[in-house]
Amino acid sequence: MRPDGAALVTGASGGIGAAVADRLAGQGWPVGVHYRSDEAGAAEVVERIESGGGSAVALHADVSERDAADRLVGELEDRFGPVLALVNSAGTRADGLAPQLKDEHWDRVIETNLSAAFRLTRRVLRPMLRARYGRVVNIASVVGPRANAGQSNYAASKAGLIAMTHTVAVEVARRGITVNAVAPGFVETGLTADISSEAVAAEIPARRPGRPEEVAACVGFLASDEASYVTGTTLTVDGGMSA
Ligand SMILES: NC(=O)c1ccc[n+]([C@@H]2O[C@H](COP(=O)([O-])OP(=O)(O)OC[C@H]3O[C@@H](n4cnc5c(N)ncnc54)[C@H](OP(=O)(O)O)[C@@H]3O)[C@@H](O)[C@H]2O)c1
């Protein structure tokens, strides 16, 4: 049975993170709705959760800053108690073919998608180890395990995130903590607004983009008590794209 505690969802001001925040609130978690620039988006998610009878608070941070993990988790603990579920959904891309890719774009994507997820995971393991209960879900991608020209930084960050997920999972498995990744294919969100859905849909066996709610349903399962024996794995949610 789940002890009392809160869930932190990073990048929850829109897209997949917002759908995950809704989902976890529906499963009874008080939720920390983290955002970086979209304050209004985060406020909307908090309002929606509260009007549905749940509890939520908006939390601001740029997760690429080194002290963000400590501050964010501390703020949520002060409000709702120990953080026993973490969903790392904050993510960014800065595409370019390798010969032209700037250091700044490499660093930003690796810091946001990989290093920040590690720092947050490391920080929440403290209360989780104490509670002998925890759920960490990292939003990876089908890009990483497979190539996507123009995304060497993004692919490296997501492949690293999957490797980190699997390794941390085996370190803490005996303490009732599960650590998993969800790897979406193509989902229509702000991150993919510049990509033509019709063109990508032709490459997807399901012949359509995914919806944030379809990714959130998988995260909800991995964060639930029913998934207590699922750890160190990656659940692909891509309409058959990488089958
Ligand atoms: N959409 C897809 O097709 C797809 C496919 C595979 C994987 N994913 C992954 O799914 C996750 C969610 O993406 P999405 O599609 O939902 O995109 P999105 O709507 O653009 O959401 C990205 C979120 O990350 C936050 N963020 C970005 N950089 C940040 C930073 N430095 N510090 C803190 N927060 C930061 C954004 O915050 P603000 O907007 O408040 O700045 C936003 O809430 C990402 O990890 C992405 O790589 C998406």
Image: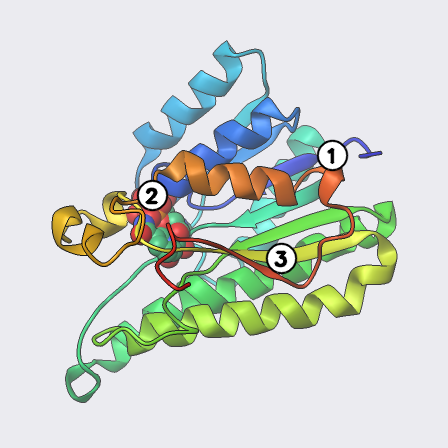
On screen, residue 20 above or below 149: above
Tell me the SS state at disc 1: loop
Q: Please say whether residue 28 is visible from this viewpoint.
A: yes
Mark 2 to mark 1 CA distance (whole Å): 30 Å
Q: Which of the 4 image quadrants contains residue 32?
A: top right
Q: Which residue is mark 1?
A: 5
Q: Nearer the viewer, residue 185 or 168?
A: 185
Instruction: Give the amino acid type for the residue marked by disc 3 in the picture.
Output: Asn
Q: Please say whether residue 59 is visible from this viewpoint.
A: no
Instruction: Give the amino acid type for the residue marked by disc 2 in the picture.
Output: Gly
Q: Which residue is mark 3?
A: 180
161 left or right, relative to 100: right
Q: Nearer the viewer, residue 68 or 125?
A: 125
Q: Which residue is mark 2?
A: 210
Frontmost of labels 3 and 2 is 2
Q: Is disc 2's CB within 8 Å of ligand 1? A: yes
Frontmost of labels 2 and 1 is 2
